[in-house]
Structure formats: structure tokens, C-alpha cells
Image (spheres, grey):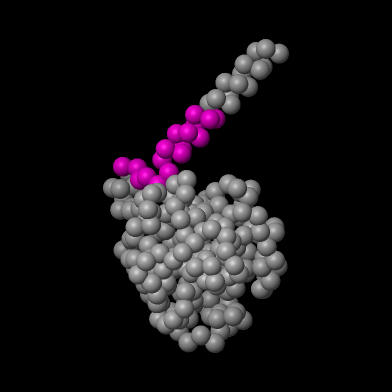
Amino acid sequence: MRKRIALAVMAAIGCALIASAQDKKINELTAEERASGWRLLFDGKTLKGWRGFHRQEPPPGWVVEAGAIKKIAGRGELGEAGGDLITVDQFANFEFQAQWKLTKGANSGIKYLVSEDSPKTGRSAVSFEYQVLDDDNHPDAKEGIAGNRTAGSLYDILPAGGSKKMRPIGEFNQTRIVKRGTHIEHWLNGVKVLEFEQGGPALKAGIATSKFKTIAGFGEAKQGHFLLQDHGNEVSYRNIKVRELK
């Protein structure tokens, strides 16, 4: 019995050491990543490189806490609590990665190819959105068509595949978005959950039945900003990085 207890204690210590080592690598690039062209979009300490949609400074309600960009819970959605947060820089062909953590029932999103011409005013952008959602506790997961509003989906257009695996509330999930030419992929926790062609028939069909069907030129942008959505709920993002593809 004592031997088993000792082994259990040693295993727990080992796990703690591994977790500690992983924590030290948060918001940092490895030498291999730097050599491959990756760069951080978040330094882990400030909102440098980020600003509000149609603003020159970050909107209220976004803070840096515990090595993550955190959206403080606010009133309602669509910018009422402050507004969306976008990168200063724009990207055309890229591999993007980020980790995100939700509170129970939370809703957010990572938008890409964002243009400040859509719309020309306001605090919230209209663009492709990688859905960030608590599928089990937010009603939006049951809305839309065939699950196209669940986590990892191209919001309200194309659903994420059924093979996805979500981590428990309070733990970080991993997002990867790849765009090369017209080909786009969504990954969630190491699994590819969606791929489509920009301008392709599947995308056009999805847009035709979505809330974006009346927006001229929707889905046609070739480059744009990344955006973290303010949907009024508490959500945290970290390890945000990108590399440009040719």
C-alpha cells in the first residue's frame, strides 16, 4: 500500500512538473517555429498589435490576465459590452493557431479575412467566423442547420465534422485555421473538422441559406484582419500565432 501511495505521489509530482514546463512555453515560440516563419500575435503581457474594430485603440472590456487576452463578461452581444478586437496587421495566406477557454454557456468567435468595410460603421465585423462556443450549454448550438453554429464550424454556413473533441469548460481548446489560395481548413484540438473552397459550390450553398445571404460580396475577401469576438461572455485567448504561407 505504501509503495502504491508513493508511486501515486511521484506520478502526481511528475504531472505537475510537466504542466509547469508547458506553462513556461505559453505565448513563446520555439526555435523551430521561428525558423519556420511563425510569429506571435500576442506577447502574453499587453494588447500591442491589437485594436478595436473601427477604433485605433483596444475597446473596453478586453484585458490581459494570467497570460491570456480575456473578454470580461458584459451586457448582451454584438459589441454592447465594448466591441470586437482585431489585429493591426492583415493576412492573405496563412496558418493561424490560438488556444481559447470558455466559461459555462459562453459564446465567442475567431473571425478572419475581416475588412473594416463590412460594415463601414459599428463595433462588430461581418466575415468568416470560426465558431467558439460551449456546445453543451449555449442554445446557439441547436440553431442553424445541421450543427453549423457549433464550435469549430464556419458560423451559420458549414458545420464542423462529428469527429471533433471538446475539452471541459475551464480548459483550453486549440484552434488551427489554414488558408492557402482558395482552400481553407478548420482544426479543433488536433483534428481537422472542416475544409472548403472559397468560392466553391459548398460554400455558396451554405451562404445562400445563412444570415449572410443578402450581404453583397460576403466571403469574397482575399485578405484581412483576425478578430476576437465580443459576444458579451467571458472568454480567454492565448498562444495566438501565425505564419504566412506562399
Position of 146 relative to 208 (above/below): above
Position of 107 relative to 21 (above/below): below
Is residue 159 visible to the viewer in this orientation of the structure?
A: no
Q: Looking at the image, which residue is at 54% across and 71% down?
A: 80
Marks counted in the figure total 0
Is residue 106 visible to the viewer in this orientation of the structure?
A: yes
Left or right, residue 241 beside residue 81 = left
Between 121 and 206, which is closer to the camera in this rendering?
121
| Residue 167: x %, y % from top left | 61, 49
Quadrant where the N terminus sits is top right
Left or right, residue 60 beside residue 56 = right
Our reading of the magenta stretch's main secondary structure is helix
Task: State which quadrant residue 75 falls in.
Answer: bottom right
24 magenta-colored: yes
Position of 36 relative to 225 (above/below): above
| Residue 105: x %, y % from top left | 66, 59
Q: Residue furthest left?
A: 35
Left or right, residue 228 beside residue 108 = left
Magenta part of the chain: 15-31
Quadrant where the C terminus sits is bottom left
Between 54 and 21, which is closer to the camera in this rendering?
54
Q: Looking at the image, which residue is at 42% across and 72% down?
A: 53
65 magenta-colored: no
Q: Looking at the image, which residue is at 65% across and 55% down?
A: 104
Position of 73 relative to 168 (above/below): below
| Residue 106: x %, y % from top left | 62, 60
Q: Looking at the image, which residue is at 51% across and 85% down?
A: 215
Left or right, residue 108 beside residue 228 = right
Between 208 and 28, which is closer to the camera in this rendering?
28
| Residue 166: x %, y % from top left | 62, 52
